[in-house]
Image (cartoon, rainbow, N blue to C red):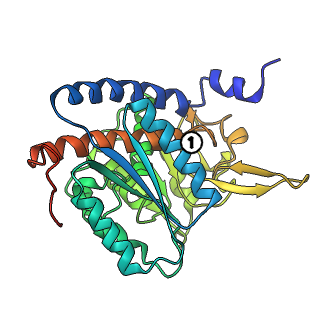
Amino acid sequence: MPTQTDHRQTDHCLIDGRAVQRRILSGLNEAFACERQRRPVGRLVSVSIGPSPEVEVYVRNQARGAERAGLPFEQQVWPAGIAPEEAKRRILALNDDGAVLGIILQRPVPAHIHVRSLQSAIHPLKDVEGMNPASIGNIVYNDIALAPCTAAAAVELLRQTGLTLQGLEVVMIGHSEIVGKPAAFMLMAEGATVTVCHHMTRSVAMHSRRADAVVVAVGKPHLIGPEMIKPGAAVIDIGINQVADAEGGIRILGDVDTDRVREVAGWITPVPGGVGPVTVAMLMRNALTAHRRQVDAGWLGGEAPGRA
């Protein structure tokens, strides 16, 4: 009898994010091998401020993704009590290190650290996460090459359905600065017609029921049920929610009630195993873009880029 994991991997309705990740990372491995024949390729540096088991999971996944893409990966854990000025100084030092390809600032950070200040300190050409305000702002001008990774993963998974994005009616549920808004702008850059719903929207279901595709990033388990989805629509579930079960264990649920919605949807991403793996692949794709842009900017032979 197949396990639930086996069933999800063979279900035609569920989009297997792990398989998509494997294909992307395999192509990136070849691309980085070609780049390395012409010039040095730097390393990715992950920065965590203070220990965090939750962050460790993301770092391990990123490290595995980097290995599959053929990139060196370094993890730095800074003291939880580090002064904001010292944290920024260290970020600027990484900017100036010609052997550093990209900087990944893990979140959350301690309360005394202003995360946007550190994100702004990362040089835009080393911002492989696409979190610098300049990187997010570029999306408004259809420059989506260094977009936030989770938003980029949602768009990539929508492409996997085979639907033509140009003219597609998409409803984005959630309007955060790092996922919902960038995803909406990226979809508009592809020619989709996008409606953004949020906590002040009067009737989310009224909008979602007419959509060809629904992208959800809210952080509320099983918020979206089958009555909110048009038959045959694509559903991209970005939500990651930890929920205690009756036995006291922890289950990971998405924002979509997958088992019920899959009976209506044409395509749906599972949680886990959907957007998460592809987010890592988008991080590595951004790293390739960052490398090539650094080369175009003349950062050769380990030369420091200077301050943004």
Give the camera-side residue of 86 and 234. 86
* 7 left or right of 213 in image: right
Give the camera-side residue of 203 and 50. 50
* 119 left or right of 238 in image: left
- The image position of residue 138, as x and y in percent, is 22, 58
Residue extending furthest top? 1
* 72 left or right of 42 in image: right
Q: Is residue 123 above or below residue 275?
A: below
Quarter holding the C terminus? bottom left
Q: What amino acid is found at the position of numbered circle 1 in the picture?
A: Lys
Quarter holding the N terminus? top right
Quarter-of-image position of residue 120: bottom left
**Residue shown at 62%/50% (left/top)?**
228
**Residue shown at 72%/41% (left/top)?**
260
Q: Is residue 100 above or below residue 51?
A: above
User: Mark 1 packing: few (<14 Cα in 10 Å), some, or many (20+)?
Assistant: many
- The image position of residue 73, as x and y in percent, is 41, 43
**Residue shown at 52%/39% (left/top)?**
277
Q: Is residue 281 visible?
A: yes
The residue singled out by tag 1 in the image is 230
Give the camera-side residue of 40 and 205. 40
**Residue shown at 29%/69% (left/top)?**
121
Q: Is residue 147 visible?
A: no
* 43 left or right of 23 in image: left
Q: Is residue 235 above or below residue 35?
A: below
- The image position of residue 266, as x and y in percent, is 56, 32
Give the camera-side residue of 178 and 125. 125
